[in-house]
Amino acid sequence: MANTASIGKTVLRFGIPLVLGGAGYVAYISGYEDGPARRDGTPGFKNVVYADQLAGGLPTACLGLTKHASPVPVVLGDYWSDAQCRAVGSQVLATGQAQVLGCIKVPVTQPVLDAFSSHGHNHGEPSTCASRAMGLLNARKYEAACDALAHGPDGKTPVWSYVKTGRKNTQGAWEYRFVQGLYNRRLKERSDCLAGVALLRAEYDFATESWKGAQP
């Protein structure tokens, strides 16, 4: 599992090969959760478990892994090797991608799955499955679905880019604050999703449900 060439599981959906928890997706999520890749292109994992301030100080390991998803304890200050990050991370990410893929009822390419899975890893797969973006995707409104990962129905207002302040307003509802970093992530997911839709339209024959593109 520690070998980047061996992680991930390939599945076929509508004749399209998709990889769950593969090295590419591990690196994709690491770029969001851990920061820029190293000079050799490998993920620059956060090897020491830290307190995620956007999650109320929740102990978090590399790839944004917490006690809610990790099969091993996530203890503040513990050191996780790169091999452990890849092995545990691939397992957790594959599970999350499988959940998201189970909610997708139409043909998609790897970039579309990765974008929606990233959203699910950040906000919880059930929230992604119940989102307006997922509804649009399953209605085959592909481009609109991608945009809905980042924007409201007006195509401009940021969504999924806020965290609770811990305070309530005078009406008793939780207050939220906008986080630019989260919005940047939503914009990247939108962009990657749109690229995946373009790939789908170019390489997939909807009539015969056959994939003409490269295998993973």
Image: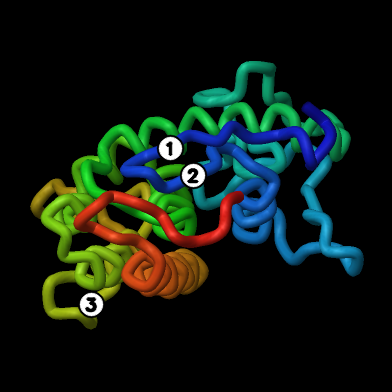
- Percent from the top left, x then y, of residue 180? 46, 73
Which sits in the foreground, 168 or 24?
A: 24
Q: Residue at x 46, y 69 (%)?
A: 192
Type of colouring: rainbow
In this view, 162 is above or below 68: below
Q: Residue at x 44, y 60 (%)?
A: 212
Q: Is residue 82 left or right of residue 32?
A: right
In the rendered structure, the answer to whether residue 64 lies left or right of residue 87 reads left
Distance from label 3 to label 1 (Cα)? 35 Å
Residue contact at pointers 1 and 2, CB within 8 angstroms: yes
Corner quadrant of residue 80: top right
Earlier residue among tags 1 and 2: 1
The residue positioned 37% from the left and 73% from the top of the image is 202
Which class describes the residues within 10 Å of circle 1: few (<14), some (14-19), or many (20+)? Answer: few
Q: Disc number at residue 157?
A: 3
Indicate the amino acid at tag 3.
Thr
Which class describes the residues within 10 Å of circle 3: few (<14), some (14-19), or many (20+)? few
